[in-house]
Image: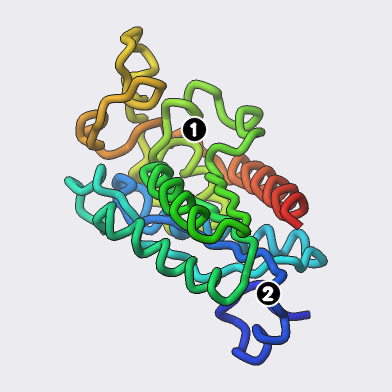
Amino acid sequence: MLSKFWTDLSSEEIKKIGKNKILVFPFSSVEQHGSHLPSGTDKLILEGILEKFVSKYPKLNNFLILPNISIGSASEHSNFEGTISANSTKYIDYIVSIVEQFCERKYKKFLFINSHGGQISHLDIAAKEIKSKYKSVDIIKANYFLFNGFEKIINKKELTYGYHGGEFETSIMLYLYPKLVKSNKLKKHQLSPDAKSKNIITYEKNIKRAWNTTDISKSGIIGDPTKASALKGKKILEVTSNTLKKIITEMN
């Protein structure tokens, strides 16, 4: 059985596969995740999610996973070392230019899977631009951290307001890459101010204030990683695998 990863295949193998496969585009980021997680956390998590998905459903073969585009738009973290961020406009243009190549080659189905909250709008704009030019293509955008089902694993308040380096991401890292988690650096950090605020203007709700991470957290962490566990991480990846299967199946 051929690999599901584009870069594992030869040009001849890719040609024989044909144009009917769903092309999965992973989008992640390299950015600070405090003192206990590596700067490649978003990249590593997304790659781990996709590897677990492929291994869980080996008979599902109507897709190919392209290389992870791991330098994203993370300017909100630019005040912290470890962050590498692309200019927003150039990043969108870059995405469009890559996907357009496949549109020109007559591929029709694209799944954008994203692991960084700061670039959701960028992927929305890129998809809109591509769709306006290539009207027959199908583009699905999925942000894994917004999948349904995590509320059964992570406390709802932490899940909603502890969205950077907290219990959620740290649990995944403990499951996938335990040696990269600096357990001696784990400590409780504050949630987003939105958790307690009654103001109509917020950081993450319907009426939003533009912000940098330093406006919310001096440490760069938003959430409580001390409650993380590898078991929770394993359960989170079961949710992501099952959800990806449903997406891929519906796109077929």
Assess disc 1: are there few (<14), some (14-19) or many (≥20) residues with their C-alpha within 10 Å of its C-alpha.
some
Closer to us: 205 or 92: 92
Residue 199 drawn at (x, y percent): 31, 9
Closer to us: 192 or 229: 192
Say how the picture is coloured. Answer: rainbow
Inspect this view and state whether residue 179 appears. Answer: no
Question: Which three-letter amino acid code belongs to the residue tagged 2?
Answer: Lys
Mark 1 secondary-structure assignment: helix
Q: What is the CA distance from the residue labelled 2 to the residue labelled 1?
A: 45 Å
Residue situated furthest left in the rendering: 79
Residue 136 drawn at (x, y percent): 62, 58
Where residue 248 sits, quadrant-wise, is: bottom right
Q: Are marks 2 and 1 in contact (CB under 8 Å)?
A: no
Q: Which is nearer the N-term, disc 2 or disc 1?
A: 2
Name the quarter where the N terminus is drawn: bottom right
Assess disc 2: are there few (<14), some (14-19) or many (≥20) residues with their C-alpha within 10 Å of its C-alpha.
some
Mark 2 secondary-structure assignment: loop
Residue 37 drawn at (x, y percent): 37, 50
Question: Which three-letter amino acid code belongs to the residue tagged 1?
Answer: Lys
> In the shown orientation, is residue 197 left or right of residue 104?
left
Q: Is residue 126 above or below residue 171?
A: below
Q: In this view, does 128 lie above or below 3?
A: above
Residue 83 drawn at (x, y percent): 26, 55
Q: Nearer the viewer, mark 2 or mark 1?
A: 2
Q: Name the residue under label 2.
A: 19
> In the shown orientation, is residue 195 left or right of residue 13?
left
For image coordinates 43% across by 44% down, the residue present is 120
Name the quarter where the C terminus is drawn: bottom right
Q: Name the residue under label 1.
A: 227
For image coordinates 42% across by 26% down, the residue present is 161
For image coordinates 35% across by 33% down, the residue present is 222
